[in-house]
């Protein structure tokens, strides 16, 4: 419990603040005060806190609107906690801005808030902004490629029947020629790479299409958009590298994990940070990531065991890394685990299990500041079947333990 604190209800244009404090056993609240979210208004809010000798603040995380409040107020003097709205939500019919601020202050004063958001340092937040923007750029690139594919389909150009990837060297050269000439009336032979299996006749049949003026205009704009997004993606990756120059050791640790490349390592670092102690335990960490089953049970009946939502930016990256790890010949133990689970539970659940295993390893690697090894985070001692005492002694002796046997 705290002696004095401030609850803040955050909105786009203004914030409502209420200070709560103990006088004896009673809780006393100040009158709800409204401040502008302009920089000047937030500085006035900070001065108001200082006048009332209140140095502990709790914000409701409303979209991105809480970020400037947190940045201006939080410093060595003021401690600011951010809480998800679901943990301080008022009952229906008893909700307004002033009551919300008072409710946050009261719950924060009595320490009745179940969980606070983890806010990483400013340098990690800067990397996170760039990596998330890069992911959006990659999604936009995929969307534009799909639009180009649709243009070829409606024009009856069957490049996808003769090429495994129409965005490879040959496909891009032919699409560029279609755009330059405004149609398919050209010889494709100079643009076909020698590694392509399809014959020249196959390409001529695939290019017996008709490109309308509207489709040609659309394809031209898509090609320009693809070039712009490709350049932007490269610039974002260079920015990511420059921002992470102070985290070379952490990136080296993440790169050593199976299935994790340099871009994935930066993405993981930007989401989880470098201080694993903030999560409390590996179980809470895995729950935060979203790779463990939810608890949804009532009257002794389990309604669902699906994995939780977790971090929607991190989870896709981890699943992609897990998919790469099961194909990595340098780490056969990962594929062996995947195949043993796949036989019983199928590909999807096996892949999520590998993702959980990978995140467990990453948690301990960063916590202990050590590179990946297959046995990290688990004890590989035999747990099923008949255990031979001599093999068990040898197992722990190889792990560095001193075994003393009594005669």
Image (cartoon, rainbow, N blue to C red):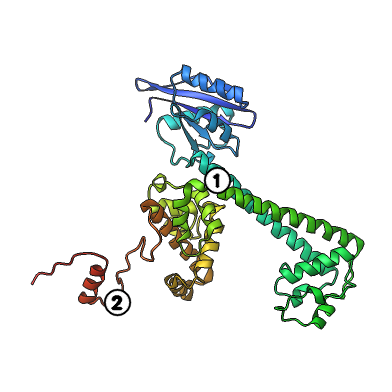
Q: Residue 296: in sight, yes or no?
A: no
Q: Quadrant of the C terminus?
A: bottom left
Task: Give yes or no for contact between labels 1 and 2 (Cβ–Cβ under 8 Å).
Answer: no
Q: Is residue 238 above or below residue 355?
A: above
| Tag of residue 41 | none
Local packing at callout 2 (Cα closer than 10 Å; few below 14, some 14-19, many 20+) is few
> In the image, residue 253 lies at what x, y percent?
44, 56
Select label 1 or label 2 by which is in front.
Answer: 1
Q: Does dot 2 land on a helix, a strand or a loop?
A: loop
* Label 1, residues with CA under 10 Å away: few <14, some 14-19, many ≥20: some
Compared to 337, does 229 lie above or below? above
Q: Position of residue 284 (x, y in %)?
A: 42, 51
Quarter-of-image position of residue 213: bottom right
Q: Which residue is drawn at the image coordinates 18% and 65% (left, top)? A: 402
Left or right of 50? Residue 388 is left
Residue at (38% x, 64% y) in the render: 373
Looking at the image, is mark 1 or mark 2 earlier in the sequence? 1
Q: Which quarter of the rendering shows the N terminus?
A: top left
Occupied quadrant, residue 16 = top right
Q: Nearer the viewer, residue 113 or 406?
A: 406
Q: Position of residue 59 (x, y in %)?
A: 51, 33
The residue to which callout 2 is attached is 385
> Could you say which is closer to the camera, residue 406 or residue 341?
406
Q: Position of residue 397 (x, y in %)?
A: 23, 69
Asked whether residue 257 appears in the rendered view, the answer is yes
218, above or below 80, in the image: below
Secondary element under disc 1, as helix, strand or loop, is helix
Most foreground residue, 371 or 288:
371
Residue 243, label in figure: 1
In the rendered image, the residue lying farthest to the top is 51
């Amino acid at each position: 419990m705290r002696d004095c604190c401030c609850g803040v209800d955050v909105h786009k244009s203004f914030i409502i603040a209420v200070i709560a404090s103990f006088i004896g056993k009673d809780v006393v609240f100040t009158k709800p005060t409204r401040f502008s979210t302009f920089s000047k208004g937030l500085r006035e809010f900070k001065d108001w806190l200082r006048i009332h000798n209140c140095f502990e603040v709790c914000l409701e995380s409303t979209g991105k609107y809480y970020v400037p409040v947190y940045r201006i107020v939080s410093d060595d003097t003021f401690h600011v906690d951010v809480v998800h709205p679901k943990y301080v939500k008022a009952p229906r019919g008893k909700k307004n801005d002033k009551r919300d601020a008072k409710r946050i202050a009261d719950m924060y004063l009595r320490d009745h808030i179940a969980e606070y958001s983890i806010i990483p340092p400013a340098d990690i937040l800067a990397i996170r902004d760039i990596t998330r923007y890069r992911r959006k750029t990659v999604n936009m690139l995929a969307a534009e490629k799909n639009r180009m594919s649709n243009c070829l389909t409606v024009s009856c150009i069957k490049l996808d029947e003769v090429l495994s990837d129409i965005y490879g060297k040959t496909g891009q050269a032919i699409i560029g020629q279609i755009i330059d000439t405004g149609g398919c009336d050209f010889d494709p032979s100079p643009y076909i790479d020698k590694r392509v299996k399809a014959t020249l006749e196959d390409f001529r049949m695939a290019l017996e299409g008709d490109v309308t003026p509207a489709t040609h205009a659309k394809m031209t704009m898509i090609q320009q958009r693809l070039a712009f997004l490709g350049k932007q993606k490269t610039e974002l990756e260079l920015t990511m590298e420059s921002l992470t120059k102070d985290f070379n050791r952490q990136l080296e640790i993440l790169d050593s994990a199976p299935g994790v490349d340099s871009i994935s390592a930066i993405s993981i670092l930007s989401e989880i940070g470098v201080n694993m102690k903030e999560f409390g335990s590996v179980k809470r960490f895995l729950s935060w990531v979203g790779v463990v089953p939810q608890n949804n049970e009532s009257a002794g009946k389990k309604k669902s065991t699906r994995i939780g939502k977790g971090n929607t930016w991190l989870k896709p990256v981890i699943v992609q890394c897990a998919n790469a790890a099961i194909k990595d010949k340098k780490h056969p133990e990962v594929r062996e685990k995947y195949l043993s689970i796949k036989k019983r539970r199928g590909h999807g659940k096996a892949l999520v299990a590998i993702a959980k295993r990978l995140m467990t390893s990453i948690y301990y690697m960063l916590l202990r500041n050590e590179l990946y090894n297959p046995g990290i985070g688990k004890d590989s001692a035999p747990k099923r079947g008949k255990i031979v005492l001599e093999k068990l002694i040898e197992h722990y002796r190889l792990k560095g333990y001193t075994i003393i046997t009594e005669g």
